[in-house]
Image (spheres, grey):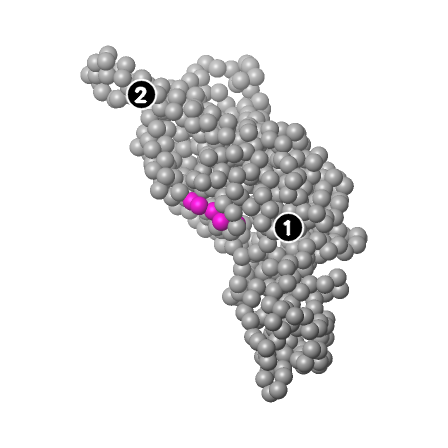
């Protein structure tokens, strides 16, 4: 089977990338071998020298993408809406969210992170018991085959935890990846720091294989701030979970990390991954980010985590008094309490949203139905999902409005704008992919409009499910062009058939006509209208001005 994302001309360029990476890695291993075979350390730590737990974990999320989300037949357009963590009243989404992904690059990024950080974690734990005198197959805890399964089992458990307590309708394995990174930073700070850099390098190689060449041109786009598309809270509870689990491991093994290295590694990871980007949404697709607060918290929490994982006899002093030892122990316990309280607080913040009954009072009136989904278009209506819980913030905690293509479902407790008004205005067309386990059906949204000179656009939005009928979902208010021709005004207004030009004088309607076809000339109410391509002009007595321009899209 030839997958859609592998064009026929990729193999030669992919071969060049693979060859360069392979030769570079072989050279580095040969130069640093120092008489030992490169796989000796791997065989000492892994069953047959392979990190089976990491491989099985990656296989799990790839299998979900291919066989549950429909990625095998449609690798670039998986079903996503049905697998988001919408509500506790929708168990499928809560269980599946952490193991499903929004796109192929999303899956690839999390798979790379799992390979990089999962390997470090698995290497630190090992498939073989380290206790002196322990029998390899003496118990389930020491059995290498059972230990190889520890990582995927833990990954599933952490994934379920992040799904159940993530804030908002999230999707993706990144919470588990951040937990692996947090764990690795505690048990192997230097290796984890190198893994952070390795993650970027591997990501570059994968991107080069997937997109060998990129051609781009300058054009206007609607871009949401990157930090507004990141599940900061979900990433934070992932890191905290990994750190606390790792502290328990180093305590049991009595193998304490270097606090300074741990502090710097956590700080570098949090900075590179944007954990400092604390934000809240506002109306009009606006967001406010508190960079100052996020930066301060990152530094404080890095220090607290380093203290929590510090050696039990902290502060280290061979001649310390019992008072110093007690103070160090209390400080360490206090740091653990702070991290635990923060994890509990961040997790608890998601519960009100997950138990809230999302209303449909502001659901779009004209909508199309696809099984239990309704798809409509509305502007400046209360955002039912965000406003389902009142969170004190400045003036009005429930003041977030939404505009765009809105998907609702009573069965799944869904109310969400999946396509923003600005995005549809920029592109003119968008697709919302609905579905569930074993089925999928897209709904297409089309916008057409005219912009009166000197005013905002007048437009109509149609929705059409694949194989279904086209439905008019929205039409804007009429708007007047700013030019005045011999005392006459021209207003563009939407109609059942399309758009019309209305001629008025001092508020009195003189006549109207449909927007002329390209190349046509029509006289109405003393004005001659002519259309040339995207422009419509009006003329009288030697005066001619452009009164409307058709919307064009990127």
- Which mark lies nearer to you, 2 or 1? 1
Q: Disc 2 versus disc 1: distance between alpha carbons?
A: 54 Å
Residue 134 place in picture, x, y as percent: 48, 15
Which quadrant holds the C terminus? Answer: bottom right
C-beta proximity under 8 Å, tags 2 and 1: no
In front of the other: 455 or 417: 455
Q: Is residue 365 visible?
A: yes
Q: What range of the chain is rendered magenta?
A: 285-289
Vertical position of residue 346 compared to residue 109: above or below: above
Task: Give the answer, above or below, for where 384 lies relative to 473.
Answer: above
Place of residue 450 in the rendered image (x, y in percent of width and height, measured from the top left): 63, 67
Q: Which residue is mark 1?
A: 378
Q: Main secondary structure of the magenta part?
A: strand
Instruction: Mark 2 or mark 1: name the one nearer the start of the chain.
Output: 2
Local SS, label 2: helix
User: For the point 56% across and 53% down, which residue is it?
Assistant: 209
Instruction: Name the residue beneath numbered marker 2.
Output: 331
Viewer-nearest residue: 214 or 430: 430
Q: Is residue 30 visible?
A: no
Q: Quadrant of residue 334?
A: top left
Characterize the local packing of mark 2: few (<14), some (14-19) or many (20 or more) Cα atoms within 10 angstroms. Answer: some
Which residue is rendered at x = 57% and y = 17% of the image? 140
Residue placed most toward the observer, 269 or 502? 502
């Amino acid at each position: 089977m030839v997958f859609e994302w592998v064009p026929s001309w990729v193999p030669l360029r992919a071969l060049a990338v693979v060859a360069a990476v392979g030769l570079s890695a072989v050279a580095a291993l040969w130069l640093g071998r120092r008489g030992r075979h490169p796989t000796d350390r791997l065989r000492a730590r892994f069953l047959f020298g392979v990190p089976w737990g990491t491989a099985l974990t990656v296989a799990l999320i790839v299998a979900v993408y291919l066989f549950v989300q429909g990625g095998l037949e449609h690798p670039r357009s998986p079903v996503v809406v049905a697998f988001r963590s919408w509500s506790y009243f929708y168990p499928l989404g809560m269980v599946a969210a952490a193991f499903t992904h929004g796109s192929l690059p999303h899956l690839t990024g999390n798979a790379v992170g799992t390979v990089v950080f999962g390997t470090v974690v698995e290497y630190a734990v090992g498939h073989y018991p380290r206790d002196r005198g322990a029998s390899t197959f003496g118990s389930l805890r020491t059995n290498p085959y059972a230990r190889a399964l520890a990582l995927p089992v833990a990954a599933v458990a952490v994934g379920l935890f992040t799904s159940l307590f993530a804030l908002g309708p999230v999707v993706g394995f990144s919470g588990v990846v951040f937990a692996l990174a947090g764990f690795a930073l505690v048990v192997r700070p230097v290796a984890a720091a190198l893994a952070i850099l390795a993650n970027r390098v591997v990501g570059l190689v994968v991107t080069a294989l997937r997109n060998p060449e990129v051609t781009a041109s300058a054009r206007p786009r609607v871009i949401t701030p990157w930090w507004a598309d990141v599940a900061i809270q979900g990433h934070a509870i992932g890191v905290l979970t990994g750190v606390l689990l790792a502290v328990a491991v180093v305590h049991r093994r009595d193998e304490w990390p270097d606090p300074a290295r741990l502090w710097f590694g956590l700080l570098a990871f949090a900075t590179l991954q944007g954990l400092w980007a604390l934000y809240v949404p506002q109306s009009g697709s606006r967001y406010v980010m508190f960079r100052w607060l996020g930066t301060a918290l990152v530094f404080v929490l890095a220090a607290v985590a380093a203290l929590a994982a510090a050696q039990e006899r902290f502060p280290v002093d061979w001649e310390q008094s019992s008072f110093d030892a007690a103070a160090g122990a209390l400080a360490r316990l206090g740091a653990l309490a702070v991290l635990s309280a923060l994890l509990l607080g961040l997790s608890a913040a998601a519960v009100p949203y997950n138990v809230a009954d999302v209303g449909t009072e502001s659901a779009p009136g004209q909508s199309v139905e696809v099984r239990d989904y309704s798809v409509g278009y509305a502007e400046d209506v209360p955002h039912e999902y965000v406003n389902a819980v009142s969170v004190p913030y400045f003036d009005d905690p429930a003041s977030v409005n939404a505009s765009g293509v809105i998907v609702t479902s009573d069965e799944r407790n869904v109310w969400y704008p999946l396509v923003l008004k600005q995005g549809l205005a920029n592109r003119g067309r968008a697709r919302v992919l609905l579905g569930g386990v074993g089925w999928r059906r897209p709904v297409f949204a089309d916008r057409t409009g005219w912009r009166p000179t000197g005013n905002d656009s007048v437009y109509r939005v149609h929705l059409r499910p694949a194989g279904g009928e086209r439905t008019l979902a929205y039409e804007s208010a009429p708007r007047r062009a700013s030019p005045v021709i011999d005392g006459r005004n021209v207003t563009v207004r939407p109609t059942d058939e399309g758009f019309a030009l209305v001629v008025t004088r001092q508020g009195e309607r003189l006549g109207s006509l449909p927007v002329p076809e390209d190349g046509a000339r029509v006289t109405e109410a003393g004005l001659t209208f002519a259309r040339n391509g995207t422009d419509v002009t009006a003329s009288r007595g030697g005066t001619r001005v452009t009164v409307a321009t058709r919307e064009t899209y990127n």
